[in-house]
Amino acid sequence: MSLLAKLRYQFMVKGVGAALLRLERWRSARRLRTRPPGRDAPFGPPLATSPWLKQLIAGHYLSGRYSTGARPVAWVTSGGPVEFLVALGYHVHYPENHGAVCGIRRVAERLCERAEDAGYGRDICSYARTDFGTVLGGATPVGRLPRPDLLLCCNNICQTVLHWYRVLADHYRVPLLLIDTPFLYRQAHDHEVEYVKRQLDQAVVVAERVAGRSLAPSRLEQAARLSKEAVELWARVLAAARARPAPISAFDAFIHMAPIVEMRGERFTVEYYRALLDELERRRQQGIAAVPGESKRLLWDNLPIWYRVRWLATWLAERGVALVASTYTHAWGELAPLMDSRRPLESAARVYLHPILNRSTGDKLRTIQQLAGDYSVDGVLLHSDRSCKPYSVGQLDQQKLLGRKLGIPALVMEADHNDPRVFSEAQTEARLQAFLEMLAG
Amino acid sequence: MLDIPSRRQVMEEQHQAGGRVAAVFPIHYPRALLQAHGFLPIEVWGPPGTDVGEADAHLQSYVCDIVRRGLGFVLAGGLRDCDCLLVPHGCDSLQGLGSILLDFHHPGLPVLTFYLARGEGPAALDFTVAELAGLSQALADISGRPLDEQAWNRHLEIEVAAEAALARLWRERRQLELDNAELYRLLRCRNYLAADRFRELLDKVLDRHRGAAPGQKAILLGGIVAEPVGLLEVIDRAGGLVVGDAGCNLGRRLYRAVDDEPDPARRQARRLLGGPPDATRGAAPSRIAEHLLEQAAGSGARALVVTNPKFCEPELFVLPEVTRLLEAAGLRVLVLELELSRDLPAAAANRLEAFLETL
């Protein structure tokens, strides 16, 4: 770490940057108040907390931009145990979240092509290709990514991240911490929890060495407590959509989930979700719908199709269809009961073993069934995501069982979360149209 | 032609001798433990000729051939003479296969799983020992008899001896008159023969087939599995000589002997965790490249031919960097994506022939 970099960080991030982002938030909020969407828009009024969300995301990337040399930087997989890194003062960068930003901003394809030019085949995850494209010099909408001092890979979402992070570790020549989480075909056994716990203990030692400081138990407990609070609030934010009409859609949640993924363990994340929850409660009381005239309610399974989120949201809303829940966003809220800030590492071992993607296909079916009931949905959209096999394998059976045994109609839609070249708008539209007609009976 | 027993023959003999058969999906699993419980492991690598129509109703088109054909084989009743099915955790697709078999398909025989630790050090070792204990208990439940630890140690010794014989075969490859297709017919019976029988067969071949090897252009074969067989025939015709295997099916399962460990569980675990670097176990590209260069130097290979089924993510991630490092060190690399079921496509055959001509 250098003094100059630290001064620059303080000035650009905490000083000028923070002031500019506050100003931009104020201007965005004013625009929202003075220029509400037109009467023809298929959506309800935008969430008033959205400018705050933009401020948080922009602030996070701004912090990353000036972190190199000023504070330790870790690149982390989206399901990674991050609390001890936050407590050690790391800036935490999530390549998957960055990939989603690139997907939404329609630059992922270009970045994927850059990676493909370097030999990475089109059959590997499009998040990974987006990341490799960026690492290899492709321009990103967030400006510049911080160089990692440490990589933390937790394979509780897929094995793909392990291969991906090995490539990154070779490229950057920095330590790679692997938290290997055995896949749970059934309930977790003691030896699996113990294995993860021991890896976490070892990871802390390496992270301390790289950061050049010791982990203070009080700081870890605080990060774990804030993480748990945020996760609980996030779960309540999602649960707000159980109301009829839903005051928030799953499409909104795809965007508003950014802090729960990449800013866990921070106080501002808790404050943000508390405000969002308050706003949703007000909307519920006032009967404000995410989709005015909501007539059908659907559940989403798998990652969003980032480059078509707006298109799909509009297409469904124009037909009075609200996407009210998703297994994807739910994954960040469902594990709150397992979190215990008084025993942060012990409970982390259990928590990080249990994301939906590390549980069996049968367990996922039960989750879908549970959500379908809780959110009173009329049907399920299963995004068969070419880039995410752990999420997608099993969907064809889940579809059949949902329909035949549980009476919940489900549609499988072929796409990819970040590579638009394998998405057919016409085909998707035709299948959705047929599905809605079937639901209308 | 070598006299090699077929899978069917071996299974019948095993049953006639009062033993059991375990069908096993790729890749890494404790072969000796299964044998100690009286189960002969018969591996299922996406049997060519399997009708995948039924599997297509359950798996998306972007799942690899090994998993799709494997499921097709299971659903078509291909395991009717087996006593259990073991699905080791080899990758995301095999994970999904194990899960849907357990949760949705219930193929009429016990389905067991085994998680291969991707971590290292004492935590991974202890975890693997516990994982082996769980698998052992499941096998004991099926067979109705407890594990004989002495038998486990004995089978570990037999496995080590078979691997030593295999290593010897590669060392003496240039003095074996077998062509590549015949050699791989021999080697692939490692997938279903008991280790002692496999070793006997190798020893016999090493004694009886002395002579100049037919090819001159020394290459390594890498990737997941050397299929289809047409691939080897093209190598034969083009004067290639496979002098080493770095594939998942063979070379990456030449584990360390671990002679200093009396406890069979820890020995088995250390062997599994200490195998050659393998993309499917999450090895770094640099380590894989380093190992391949050592293998090439030791065998005199001038090139590496990699054959993978389509959609194999672990391989796709490491190949760009591995290729770059190998070529920088002077080892030529050809990567082919092939389907298991078909004959070698003409385009792939042409590429392979052209590649071998340049050596």
Image (spheres, rainbow, N blue to C red):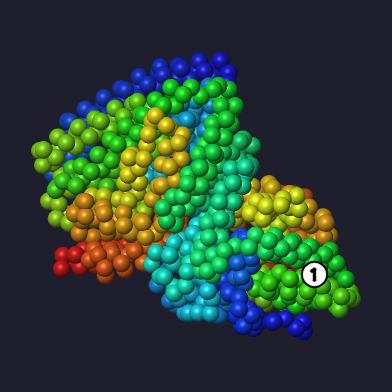
Judged left or right of residue A222, residue B189 is right
Give x and y (percent) for residue A431: 29, 65
Chain ID for label 1?
Answer: B
Q: Is residue B143 above or below residue A314?
A: below
Q: Residue at x 33, y 26 (%)?
A: A268
Asked which quadrant contains residue B136, the reply is bottom right
Mark 1 crowdedness (10 Å alpha carbons): few <14, some 14-19, many ≥20: many
Q: Write down the quadrant of residue A369 in the picture.
A: bottom left
Lateral position of residue A415 relative to residue B319, left or right? left
- Residue at 26% in and 24% down: A26
The residue where tag 1 is placed is: B241
- The structure residue drawn at horizontal position 41% and vertical position 26%, both measured from the top left corner, is A221
Q: Quadrant of residue A25?
A: top left
Residue B245 appearing in the image: no
Give the residue at the far right of this rendering.
B211
Q: Position of residue A435 (x, y in %)?
A: 24, 65
Front one among A348 and B304 = A348
